[in-house]
Image (cartoon, rainbow, N blue to C red):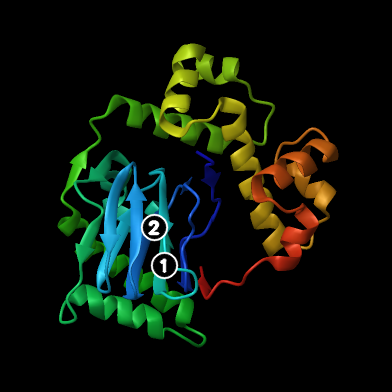
């Protein structure tokens, strides 16, 4: 399984899309996809759902997920929210998991109204409106997901590994270092990663580095060389090689083709 880590690094991000990412990926934010037109098949932690218009698909932090859609034929509203903006609900989100990842939204429900407000936000105060209505949206969505405490040991370990790498990927980290810091054996970490994500520790570290590089290539004018060293690569050659293998395009080409975001705050 070719896995992608997305480093969004925003409180709230909104995209209107005609298709959705088909590669398995994960991130530290909540992801919400509202189906406006056509259908999609969504997978979260190996659980498969068929999405129809009016369905809301919710993914929690570090859940591996992906989509199957008909090219250029759908319409989807996608939100990514940092758990940090949820205040009293943050701990519930980072320590729990949904019993199911899909709910249906009726047009007369408050959830639909909040989604409509998010879609219509514009002008000077648009970003603030998006943030406010996104928080209100989650106060209605979370109870409908019937959250339960994470009970799968391997899932807890995966989250811990992901969070550790997220905090240290710019450093010269190794499997031995994370094993010592987390008080886990190197074999157990490698085995868990392989079983859950089909990749090794170094591949995971490089995913975080490439994701940060993508963010900087889109959002800044920094030189490619500076970005490569900043995200943790020891040479420009290794940065170019790993980035191209992961994104199927060079860093320079990626910067040229980066897409815009509707709202971000």
Residue that lies at the very extreme toward the bottom in this rendered image: 123
Dot label at residue 167:
none
Residue 85 versus residue 190 in the image, above or below? below
Viewer-closest of 75 and 238: 75
Q: Which numbered disc, 1 or 2, marks the residue that appears first in the sequence?
A: 2
Seen at 70% across and 67% down, the residue is: 257
Question: Residue at coordinates 47% horizontally, 72% vertically from top-left?
Answer: 17
Q: Is residue 4 above or below residue 192?
A: below
Instruction: Tell me the tag on residue 31.
Output: 2
Q: Position of residue 56 (x, y in %)?
A: 28, 65
Residue at the far front in the pictured view: 70
- Whether residue 36 is situated above or below residue 64 in the rendered picture: below
Label 2's element? strand
Report the disc number at residue 78.
Answer: 1
Give the x, y percent position of residue 244: 73, 47
Please tell me how many numbered marks the rendered image carries: 2
Kind of element beneath mark 1: strand
> Measuring 54% from the left and 21% from the top, which residue is drawn there?
178
Q: Position of residue 249 (x, y in %)?
A: 73, 54
**Residue 114's x, y, as percent?**
28, 77
**Distance (Cα) linking label 1 and label 2:** 7 Å
Q: Can residue 91 be seen here?
A: yes
Residue 229 visible to the viewer:
no
Q: Are marks 1 and 2 in contact (CB under 8 Å)?
A: yes
Q: Is residue 100 left or right of residue 197?
A: left
């Amino acid at each position: 399984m070719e896995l992608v880590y997305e480093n969004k690094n925003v409180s709230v991000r909104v995209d209107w899309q005609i298709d959705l990412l088909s590669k398995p990926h994960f991130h530290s934010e909540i992801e919400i996809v509202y189906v406006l037109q056509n259908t999609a098949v969504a997978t979260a932690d190996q659980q498969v759902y068929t999405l129809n218009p009016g369905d809301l698909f919710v993914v929690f932090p570090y859940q591996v997920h992906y989509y199957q859609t008909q090219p250029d034929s759908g319409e989807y509203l996608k939100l990514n929210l940092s758990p940090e903006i949820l205040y009293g609900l943050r701990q519930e989100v980072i320590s729990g998991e949904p019993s199911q990842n899909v709910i249906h939204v009726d047009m007369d429900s408050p959830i639909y109204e909040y989604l409509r407000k998010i879609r219509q936000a514009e002008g000077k105060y648009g970003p603030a409106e998006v943030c406010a209505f996104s928080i209100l949206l989650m106060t209605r969505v979370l109870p409908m997901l019937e959250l339960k405490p994470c009970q799968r040991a391997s899932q807890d370990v995966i989250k811990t590994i992901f969070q550790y790498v997220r905090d240290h990927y710019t450093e010269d980290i190794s499997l031995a270092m994370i094993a010592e810091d987390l008080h886990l054996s190197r074999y157990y970490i490698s085995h868990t990663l392989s079983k859950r994500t089909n990749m090794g520790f170094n591949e995971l570290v490089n995913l975080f580095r490439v994701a940060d590089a993508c963010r900087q290539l889109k959002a800044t004018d920094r030189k490619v060389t500076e970005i490569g060293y900043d995200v943790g690569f020891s040479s420009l050659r290794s940065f170019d090689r790993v980035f191209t293998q992961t994104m199927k395009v060079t860093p320079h080409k990626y910067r040229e083709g980066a897409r815009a975001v509707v709202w971000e705050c």
